[in-house]
Image (tube, rainbow, N blue to C red):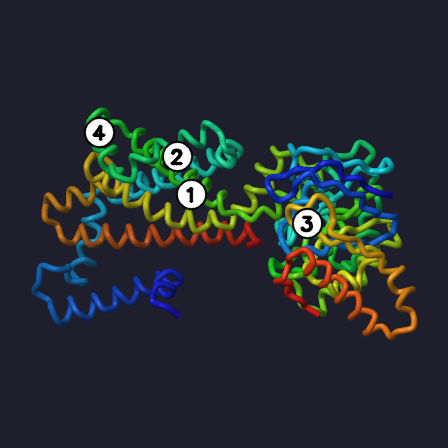
Amino acid sequence: MGMKLNNLNYENVIKEFNSDINCKINSINSIVCFDDSASKLLKIIGRVIDNIDGEIKFSDEMETAVYIPTDPASFPWLNVEDNIKYVLENSTHLSNKIENNILQIINDVGLNGYEKHFSDNNSLGFRFRISIARALVFNSILILIDNSFCVMDDETKFELFDMIKSISKKYDVSFLINTKNISDAIYLSKNIYLMKEGKETFLDSINLLEEWKELGSEDRRSRQQKIVEKIINIFTKNNLDNIQLKL
Amino acid sequence: MSLNKIIYKKPFKIIVSFLIIWIILFQFIFSGNNILPRPIILLESFNDIISDYQLIPNLLYSIGAITFGIIASIFSVYFLRYYLLTQNLFSDLLQAISKPGSFVPIFIFSIFLIFWLPQSIYIEYLFLAFISLGYISLQLIDINKTLSNAYFNSAKSLGINKNKIVTEINFKQILPSMEKIILVLNIKTWGILLVFEFIQNTNGLGSVLHSSLILKDLYSLFLTTIVICVLIIIFQYIIQIVFNRFVHWE
């Protein structure tokens, strides 16, 4: 599955933006970005922002991209099961909605036994799992995650990374994740896109499988360090000096 | 715990403490005074005050007015929530109408209403309902402006239509804040009600206060005041119980 972005314009953040995003089935991709532009791009793809100039073309029938915002967005007045049912009953996007087994989805996002549980406002991991489950009730989807992990502690974050990897394989779902954390992007993704406000395309894209092959003789830590340095160099060349690394 | 929180969370304890201090001071120390009544005499004249001033019917009349005002306004807000939570002529008009409220006291409006309809018993009920509706609506509009976009963005991406997002998601997002709004409204409406009834001087606890003042009856004045305070606290408790029961999220 791929996605072609043609001449996207939104406010002054995204200008004449053209690019291809390679979101193969089962793939997890990240956009590393230190301003608002990737967040806006994800909102455009996820149909949160409409009335924009330009167009988004999906390469196959898959036209549903679900956006998960930075702040938790599961409804705290509904329990886990009802959160999913509510989306299924009220969504107007898809005509070919498939009612997957809700209990199976709940189990796969790690909420087995919590079907009737109401989430606590501060339980970010729990609420994120509900958001993923709500996105999974549609048949074929691209899930867009907008910096959701920046507000979580490391333990929760890495549990969710593992969940995302297994969900991606089991449901044939692609993920496109906006993050400021280069290490997270390297840990999770197959492709990393680098983005900066006002540019007409991505600054660069890095295919991590190819990079690993090139650096095959080195140990994991040093390979990761070299990728980080490469990403920093690309941003530095593009006049972005204030990169805050969180390694 | 700050003094405000103690007063807010334990109002009955404050009232009981006040009554104990009152009994000690005005029964035993300042027994011959005209500041507050002597407890023993108030107790003896309790039945007379209730019958002379028709305290029970007036009390029920005031409770009816407050209950009607708050409940009618809550139902109205529920049915109008889409128009209140979206940018449209209705919400703009409401905000424009409320502007004079910042420099014209609400009591002025009540004086005019009493002047036009001096004997009407319905006008008080309608006036309170209208004022409550205006207050809740404006607070709702203000809170709506500060809501996080996360629910809206997520719901929109999931394909939920705007009407449902506003009426079901945004409204429920605001509901927990409504508790504080209605608690404040309860106190405000009691103030407006008492002034209205005091000026109109036909029915309600405000008219009892009016008569007590005219007759310089300190005992009736004091007893009515205690009754009003206890009623306000009971209403606060009921509002909190209802919200704790039905609004479990933050």
Instruction: Name the residue located 11 percent from the left edge and 68 percent from the top edge.
Output: B30
Q: What residue appears at the point 15 percent right and 62 percent down from the top-left corner?
A: B38
Q: Are marks 2 and 4 on the same chain?
A: yes
Which circle marks residue B139 in the picture?
1
For disc 3, the neighbor class at 10 Å (few under 14, some 14 to 19, many from 20) is many
Marks 2 and 4, Cα distance to the nearest angstrom?
22 Å
Q: Is residue B241 above or below residue A158?
A: above
Say left or right for A206 vs B119: right
Q: Please state which amino acid type lies under the numbered disc 1.
A: Gln
Amino acid beneath label 4: Phe
Depth-wise, is mark 4 or mark 3 nearer the camera? 3
Residue matched to label 2 = B95
Which circle marks residue B112 in the picture?
Answer: 4
The three-letter code of the residue at mark 3 reads: Ala
Per the image, label 4 sits on a secondary structure element best described as: helix
Q: Which numbered disc, 2 or 4, marks the residue closer to the eye?
A: 2
Q: Which label sits in the foreground, 2 or 1?
A: 2
Q: Chain of mark 1?
A: B
